[in-house]
Structures are given as C-alpha cells and as structure tokens.
Image: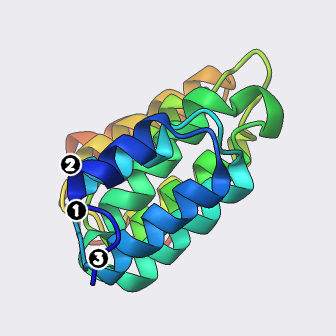
Amino acid sequence: MPRYTPEEIRATFANSTEFNDIFDAFEDAIAQRIQDVELYRLLFWNHFLGPDELCLFGEKLAREFPGISYDIYMWLASVFEVTYSSYDNFELAIKYYRKAAEARPSAPDPYLDACDCYDPDLNIPPIDVLLEFLKGSLDHVNNRKVILGRLSHLYHLIGDEDQSKYYRDLAEQPDRPKLSNGLN
C-alpha cells in the first residue's frame, strides 16, 4: 500500500530539506510506477540535493522506466548545466547529454544543447569533447544539417576556418552519401 499520495510526493520533492524524506517519497513513487516526468523535475530542482544525489535518483529512474530515460537524462543535463556548472566544468551536463543521445540517437537536441554549454573564453567544456560528440552523431541524427552547421560554428569559434568551411559546405548538402573524412 502506498505511503504517499501523488500530491504528497510532489510536495516532498519540491519542499523537503531532508534527504531521507525525499528518498522515501522517491521509493514510493517508484513502487507506485509513477512515470510523470514533471513530478521528477521537481525532485531534480530541489536545491537541498547535491550532484551525487541527483545522479542517484536520475540513474534509478532511467533504469526503472526506460521509456522516459531520454527525458530524465535531458532534464538532468540541463539542471547540471545551470546549477553546477561552476563546480564541475559541465562534466555532468555533458555526461547526461551523452546518455540522452544514447537513449534517443536520432534526436539532435542532446548534441545541440551540449554545444550551448560551450564557453569559448574558458574552453568549457573542452572543445575537442564537443567536436567528437557532434561528429559521432552524424550517423544517427535525422537532421544532419543542424549538426553540420553547429560543427561549422564551433570550428569558427576556435579559429579553424578550413574545417568551418568544410562543415558549412556539407551543411548545404546534408544528404550527400559519404563525407570526405569517412563520416556518414
């Protein structure tokens, strides 16, 4: 028998300052098979939870409810991007954008949102990490043009105009069967 009503779970996620109370409500939500992403967003925005606790909750949710794992990972990434960026140099944000991309490889949003994290003055997250992530998406995303355009933009930001032009030209012909560097 559930210990918490959905309203009590919602209130606990939003307002509780006690980890044990939050954990109990979380476990009860899992036991009730509640798959409401909006409910868990309240949990992820609870300022009394640290990054380790958020990761614990997010990973458990994704395992329990694979159907909403993409949304969970995207939301976690955005929380880490906004809330903890100054502490971990966006490592957790990128980690969860990668997990979202694994959950739904054809969606361009994880790749594009990861690029939005980039601070060229600080090179955070490291540009090579972003470039590799974007290039790896080209075999999977439905809309390659936006990814190619973003690659061009990133190369422009770091001053590599040859690569910027290369990807800009590819973006103008995104359905070309084979890229000259071996990427599809």
Q: Where on the picture, by quarter, is residue 161?
A: top right
Q: Are marks 1 and 2 in contact (CB under 8 Å)?
A: yes
Q: Nearer the viewer, residue 8 or 39?
A: 8
Quadrant the N terminus occupies: bottom left
Work out how far the residue at label 3 is from the one at label 1, CA to CA, in angstroms: 55 Å
Instruction: Looking at the image, tell me whether mark 3 or mark 1 is earlier in sequence order.
Output: 3
Q: Nearer the viewer, residue 79 or 22?
A: 22
Q: Secondary structure at mark 2?
A: loop
Q: Amino acid at mark 2?
A: Gln
Residue 182 spot, x, y in % from top left: 48, 73
- Write down the residue under mark 2: 173
Work out how far the residue at label 3 is from the one at label 2, CA to CA, in angstroms: 56 Å
Residue 164 position (above or below residue 141): above
Residue 176 bears which disc, if any?
A: 1
- Can residue 175 be seen here? yes
Residue 162 bears which disc, if any?
A: none
Q: Secondary structure at mark 3?
A: loop
Q: Amino acid at mark 3?
A: Pro
Residue 53 spot, x, y in % from top left: 67, 57
Residue occupying the point 34% across, 69% down: 29
- Write down the residue under mark 3: 2
Q: Amino acid at mark 1?
A: Arg
- Can residue 166 be seen here? no
Q: Residues within 10 Å of mark 3 (few under 14, many from 20)?
A: few
Q: Secondary structure at mark 1?
A: loop
